Amino acid sequence: MIAAAGEENTAARTSVFSKLWPWLCAALSGLLMALCFAPFNIGGLAFVALGPLLCAIWLKVPARRAGWYRLGLGYVAGLVFFTVTFSWLSELGPLYDSVFLRSLPFLLALYLSIYPAVWAWFAGWIAGSHFARVPLDRLLPPPRVPLLFSTYNLALSILVSAAWVATEWLRGPVITNFAWNALGVALYHPATLPMIQAVEFTGVGGLSFVLMMCNAIGLITVLRLREEIGRARIRPHFDFSATVALVVALFFHGLWAYRNRQPAATVPLRVVAVQPDIPQKWKFSNGKDAEIFERLDRLHGLAEALQPHLVLWPEASVPGGMLADVETQRFVRDHAGKVPALLLGTDDFSRNRNSAAFIVRGREEVQFYDKRSLVAFGEFLPARPLLGWALDGLVPGDFEAGTEAKIFELAEPAIKFAPLICFEDTVGNLVREPVQLGANVLVNVTNDGWFGRSAAAEQHFVNAIFRAIENRRPLIHATNTGVTASVDVLGNVVRWAAPFTAVAVQQQIHVPTGRETTFYTRNGEVFSIACAALTLAAMAGRLWLLRRRRAN
């Protein structure tokens, strides 16, 4: 009886584990993806992070309600990933003294997790019976066992990768315009810099595609070897070889880009970035206005002595915006008159815009660029008729979005630059538009002081790095608290100042003078759109085959 009871307990534990392990695998994938990004920065995990989730959705799904089961697995993975990687959003809680905002990472994850959930459903549904277990006592496989054939495996991994890229792409323009930390962004590290040069053709979606291919083929290879060893018959794995060849091709393309993508002609641009390190709470208190103006005045004085071509003040640099009153306008004008040109970020409630103002010494006119990509729950409230009753106190009004890209011109040196504000340098399709208009360099002014000493500023910057490579234009990233840095056309980073230090720092940027544009600049997210089209075509084809099979 004791032995029987022990067997029952063992069987019960085995049963519980059998039910739990798919969900643990899903959570593990979410955690591994989060570890790819700041503050952890273990980018190499992106090559294997989705393996546990794929293992769960391909190998351990009940026959009944399999679709809902896979949706749940993908949703759990997304919930862990987005809650952890965007945990810095909770910094808004103490800033506004709001319990709701403390839970914002989880609340945002509730929505964003829909995308990996849909992908998990598709990955399982499109595979069908591809991973059905084949009895190992047979000496030869029955006709057409898909797992044992490279063509099937390669086609499946391509479709799964295309679907992942499609869901990442849709995460951007739908509702929040918040597509940070796509899988391909994990490759921003210097060690993998050659691999990311391909984004001038595909955007970040191309990198996500390759990484998902590695995840899928890696798992398929392990499962296939298990079957083949059991049958004592190992065949060539052309699917694995093709994936390795793709990674090697990316690397060698990067080496070629290093030799052939250096600008033929450049001009030196001396830029001074004023990083005032103004705590966000100061901006909510009128009592700190005088101290903010004093700090800007002192740092701008240091900038003058460096004799720059262009001085940058960060987003929302002056209290109330430069048009708030006559004194503020005079302050900005006086300081702009002491340098050849000044670009500053200004929240002007009189214009109801978040803008970048460009002032050239000797010119009366002030040129404005109005931010086009507004931040949800910060600059506008999505679905205000539904959410206004709860959030009007936090987001009392909506900024108006700008309607067009603009470029500003310097006379000395003769260059054109694209002004960008806040998170706009993380939106690939938006950044390429001013480059099409002739911009030689990208200049982003941002605050990044909202989230304290969290990973937000670092995540923002690494997502922005890819804009320089996509368009082969240098990027200057000027901030209030950090990261203040620049990126050259090959993605090499120069960090100008330590975060959370008040400083005026100068760097010389080599700005290309040519008008050559990349495939991405001309065509945008065509690769991601093609992946979405391939996913829809695959769904239509499988539905047609299923109906035909039922009819027969």
Image (spheres, rainbow, N blue to C red):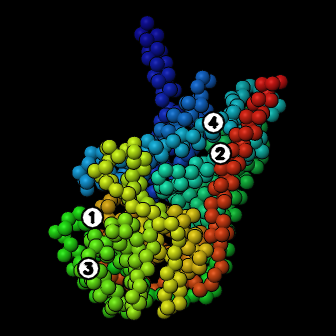
Element class at badge 4? helix
Please give the residue where the numbered disc 2 appears in the rendered image. Answer: 160
Q: Is residue 424 visible?
A: no
Q: CA distance from mark 4 to mark 2?
A: 9 Å
Q: Quadrant of the C terminus?
A: top right
10 Å crowding of disc 2: few (<14), some (14-19), many (20+): many
Q: CA distance from mark 4 to mark 1?
A: 46 Å
Element class at badge 2? helix
Q: CA distance from mark 2 to mark 3?
A: 59 Å
- Position of 453 relative to 168 (above/below): below
Q: Nearer the viewer, residue 291 or 499?
A: 291
10 Å crowding of disc 4: few (<14), some (14-19), many (20+): many
Please give the residue where the numbered disc 1 appears in the rendered image. Answer: 280
- Position of 210 relative to 112 (above/below): below
Q: Earlier in the sequence, mark 2 or mark 1?
A: 2
- Amino acid type at circle 2 is Val
What residue is rendered at 23% in x and 74% in y? 292
Please give the residue where the numbered disc 3 appears in the rendered image. Answer: 326
Q: Residue furthest top?
A: 1
Q: Is residue 7 left or right of residue 547?
A: left
10 Å crowding of disc 1: few (<14), some (14-19), many (20+): some
Q: Is residue 196 visible?
A: yes
Please give the residue where the numbered disc 4 appears in the rendered image. Answer: 124
- Position of 393 relative to 415 (above/below): above
Q: Nearer the viewer, residue 164 or 528?
A: 528
Q: CA distance from mark 2 to mark 1?
A: 43 Å
- Amino acid type at circle 3 is Val
Q: Nearer the viewer, mark 4 or mark 1?
A: 1
What residue is rendered at 37% in x and 73% in y? 345
Q: Nearer the viewer, mark 2 or mark 1?
A: 1
Q: How many numbered markers are drawn?
A: 4
